[in-house]
Amino acid sequence: MNHTVRSGKLVAAGVHSFTSVGVVLGFMALRSILHGDPSDALLWLGAAMVVDGLDGPMARHFRIGEKLPHVDGSVLDKVIDYLTYALIPAVFLYYFGLVPGGWGIAAAAVILMTSLYSFANRELKTRDNFFDGFPATWNLVVLGFYLLDSGPVLNGIVVIICGVLTFFPVKFIHPFRVKSIRPVTIGMTVMWALVTVHLITRRGAGTDLFQAEPAALLFFSLVSLYFIALSIVRSVRGRL
């Protein structure tokens, strides 16, 4: 094996190892849930999202599929994503009682079962890189429940709606992959992420966000609505 081939395999192994860090971050999130610390759990899930956002571009740049063809990076990614985007958020919702009493298992089942279809759907992405149907981003859903302190009944309704939308051709934007507005969406995503970390930390310290952080909470809500609006426009018009 020549030096170039060996180096390529090492780089590919390094990228796969970086992807694998996501499962450890997911474990830390689960550990935080079991310790009764929702803020810490959401921060770990946020770190897992960062890894998930970076590993794809790295894999494509280094063309690791050609250098380690026996390792299916897409399967590796999906296993970790199911853990951090579906399973752990379902545990979060159940453990912290975010839906009406007695409905926790049913709500978790909706999350877990609809997410299986989402991850198994070979046509989940459109040609312009929107998601076709709700893309099982339940970590963001429970984040919204936590920061906005929404009521259990409303949360339950949202879970049902998102579960149903998994099977409908409603488009959801991928902030990094939609090329037409990528610079704007990346910028908005970075600012949203920074504000979100701040809000999670403050909420974890027992702060009433509506009283102490109204501007940050408004920004979080408006940027979230911005992405929802883009998704609605794409769904209705067929393009942005």
Image (tube, grey):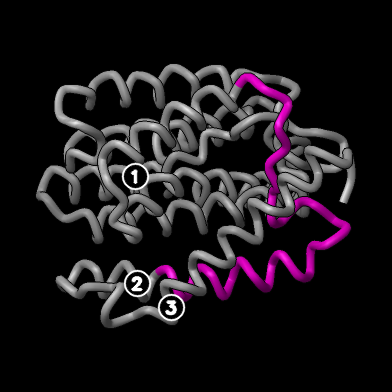
Q: Give left or right: position of 115 versus 64.
A: left
Q: Marks 2/1: CA distance?
A: 20 Å
Which residues make up the magenta segment? 167-196
Q: Residues within 10 Å of mark 3 (few under 14, many from 20)?
A: some
Residue 141: x and y, percent? Answer: 43, 45
Q: Is residue 184 magenta?
A: yes
Gap between marks 1 and 3, in whole Å?
27 Å
Residue 43 shows in this picture: no
Q: CA gap, disc 3 to disc 2? A: 7 Å
Query: What amino acid does circle 2 point to?
Result: Leu
Q: Is residue 189 above or below residue 44?
A: below
Residue drawn 71% across the image and 32% down it: 170
Along the line of sight, the residue nearer the viewer: 81 or 174:
174
Q: Position of residue 229 (x, y in %)?
A: 69, 53
Element type at mark 1: helix
Principal secondary structure, stretch drawn in magenta: helix
Q: Which residue is mark 3?
A: 216
Q: Are marks 3 and 2 in contact (CB under 8 Å)?
A: yes
Disc 2 vs disc 1: Cβ atoms closer than 8 Å? no
The numbered mark, 2 or 1, whose residue comes first in the sequence reads 1
